[in-house]
Amino acid sequence: MKETPVNKIMENTLEKMRQMVDVSTIIGEPMTTGDTTLIPVSKVSYGFTSGGTDLPSKQNAELFGGGGGGGITITPVAFIVIQGGKVRMMQINNYTSSADRAIAMIPELIDKLTELISSKDSVEKEETAE
């Protein structure tokens, strides 16, 4: 691909955006208080644009006009809560769809299934011991 001023503008814009956003922006640093650990979770949205044109010139020099820009939105959406060996997700925003609701319920569902299986195994062991 030919290197043009527009390509340079796009590369510079993307590089600056990469420097601002990394994995720790989405899954934040854990915070521990007592026996509870909170891990912030954020949604990152971004967009960028660039453009340019060669300008006609009576001189031998090439003239170019162009520009670029971008924007980033970071929105906190939830906390992963680890307490007493159990993990759950506490959502900050209202649910936007049924799929969001279902995904948020998965950790709690797994905890309940684990408890159910554990209690069933305990009852079966007691019955076999008798």
Image (cartoon, rainbow, N blue to C red):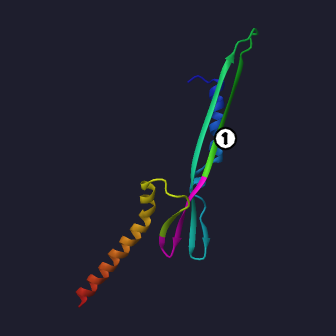
Q: Find residue 49 and report its horizontal and vertical position in percent.
A: 62, 33
Q: Residue at x 75, y 8 (%)?
A: 58
Callout 1, which amino acid? Lys
Q: Find residue 2 and report its horizontal and vertical position in percent.
A: 58, 22
Q: For the C terminus, which image quadrant?
A: bottom left
The residue range painted magenta reads: 75-86
Residue 56 picture quarter: top right
Q: Which residue is mark 1?
A: 16
Q: Secondary structure at mark 1?
A: helix
Q: Find residue 10 and report its horizontal and vertical position in percent.
A: 63, 32
Residue 66 appears left or right of 106 = right
Q: Residue at x 67, y 35 (%)?
A: 69
Residue occupying the far right of the picture: 59
The vertical placement of 62 against 90, above or below, is: above
The vertical placement of 60 against 43, above or below, is: above
Residue occupying the far top of the picture: 58
Does the magenta portion include 83? yes
Q: Residues within 10 Å of mark 1 (few under 14, many from 20)?
A: few
Q: For the N terminus, which image quadrant?
A: top right
Residue 129 picture quarter: bottom left
- Overall secondary structure of the magenta stretch? strand
Q: Residue at x 24, y 86 (%)?
A: 127
Does the magenta portion include 60? no
Residue occupying the far bottom of the picture: 130
Q: Find residue 99 and report its horizontal and vertical position in percent.
A: 42, 54
The vertical placement of 62 against 91, above or below, is: above
Q: Residue at x 61, y 51 (%)?
A: 74
